[in-house]
Amino acid sequence: MPDYFALQGSVPEFNTPLPVGQLYFPSRERYKRALRKIFDRQYYTNQGPIVRELENRLEKLLGVKNVICVNNATIGLTITAEALELFGKVILPAFTFIASAQSLMWAGLQPVFCDIDRVTLQMDMKHLHSLIDQNVSAIMGVNLWGGACSPHVLEKMAKDYKVHLYFDSAHAFGCAVNGKMIGNFGEAEVFSFHATKILCATEGGCVCSNDDDLAMRIRNIRSSYGSGALIKVIKTANGRMSEAQAAIALMSLDDFPENQKHNAELYMTYKELLSSIAGLDLVEPSGVSFSNYQYVVCIIDEGQFGISRDLLLRVLRAENILVRRYFYPGLHRTTPFADNIPDKLKRLTNTDKVCESCMQLPVGALVSVEDVGRICKIISAAHNNAPDLFVQFGEEH
Ligand SMILES: *Cc1c(COP(=O)(O)O)cnc(C)c1O
């Protein structure tokens, strides 16, 4: 099949690039109506009525006592670490977005990286167990890929070791574990409402907690201008969410059930069309009774698939299918963390393997079932033509 692929010079499968993020947009009419209210009131920010409505609706939906909206998840994680008065080291997986670890840097804490399970891609409990020592003050669980990192097990571990426990749940809005909504585990959980996440505030996020005292400290560190009790805190962060962000988030929340269903349908379509391809494993959201299917990720076994993950990535990107390596590399190999890690912790076998073989596929509101069919056709063709592709491009870097 000469020149079948755009990488070989033929016309790309898609005219416009197909993104991997969620990218939700309400209709212009709804957007105008929502924004008009802000202009009528002439009130932009400082815990306005729209932010308050968003917090109330999230508290109800998640069944959590306190939701504190913030202007992004990273500041939410940083504020939570401050409010918990953590010290020394905090354990988190190396296989996560860099912001999880950067929030610790901003809070003056030292990240300690834990390996992951090869199948679930969530934190490896055995390895985590081995990393606990006197200088560890907390575990930051990261619920990845619309799945969960065994929050019940982590809760027991935190209690046994007397360390704090909170979660980066940026991938897990709307997910549940045995029917219990994510947002209710540990001392606090943080969601991101970034444009690429299933609940979109353009930029934004929230901290959830069932601990009223902790929530009050978080509110005061965030700075709230009049909402709730005033207590003394040492640092404040101006981490508030604006009315415009909250207005978008409310529309996104209204459409969450529809967007979740759409993602689930796309995931099922990928599953159906890719299951017979050797060397390609679709990652199932693990440990949850309900998933948002915010991400579709797969693992490429080069030996069986025929070409490497990196070459498949080039093939697909040339077709305007914007797949990406995510996460790459592991945080234990990223500046500045790599420089400060003792040699024995430099190799995280499973994280390293997964970082070399994991790929994120397009999903979300801008991707249709038909698009997924066309993506799978290209992936299938790449597998069938692997020997040719390897000869032509396999040696390039
Ligand atoms: C998106 C994301 C974040 C950061 O969220 P922001 O709202 O952009 O700060 C943190 N952790 C994970 C795992 C994420 O995916």
Image: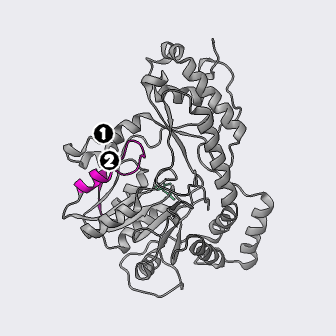
Magenta stretch containing residue 345, yes or no? no
Q: Are marks 1 and 2 in contact (CB under 8 Å)?
A: yes
Helix, strand or loop status at disc 1: helix
Displayed quadrant of residue 149: bottom left
Image side of residue 235 versus residue 201, left or right: left
The circle on residue 115 is 2
Q: Is residue 137 above or below residue 60?
A: above
Q: Mark 1 vs mark 2: which is more N-terminal?
A: 2
**For this rendering, which residue is in front, 30 or 266?**
266
What is the span of residues highlighted in magenta in the rendered image? 109-131
**For this rendering, which residue is in front, 38 or 62?**
62
What colour scheme has been applied to the protein in the rendered image?
one colour
Q: Position of residue 150 (x, y in %)?
A: 40, 58
Q: Position of residue 293 (x, y in %)?
A: 58, 50
Q: Position of residue 147 (x, y in %)?
A: 49, 53
User: In which quadrant is the C terminus drawn?
Assistant: top left
Residue lying farthest right? 29
> Would you say residue 29 is visible in this rendering?
yes
- Residue drawn at x 46%, y 25% is 308
Magenta stretch containing residue 127, yes or no? yes
Displayed quadrant of residue 69: bottom right
Q: Where does label 1 land, which residue?
A: 349
Q: What is the CA distance from the residue labelled 1 to the residue labelled 2?
A: 7 Å
Helix, strand or loop status at disc 2: loop
| Amino acid at the residue labelled 1 | Thr
| Amino acid at the residue labelled 2 | Asp
Q: How many labels, in total?
A: 2
User: In which quadrant is the N terminus drawn?
Assistant: top right
**For this rendering, which residue is in front, 289 or 379?**
289
Image side of residue 151 versus residue 321, left or right: left
> Would you say residue 106 is visible in this rendering?
no
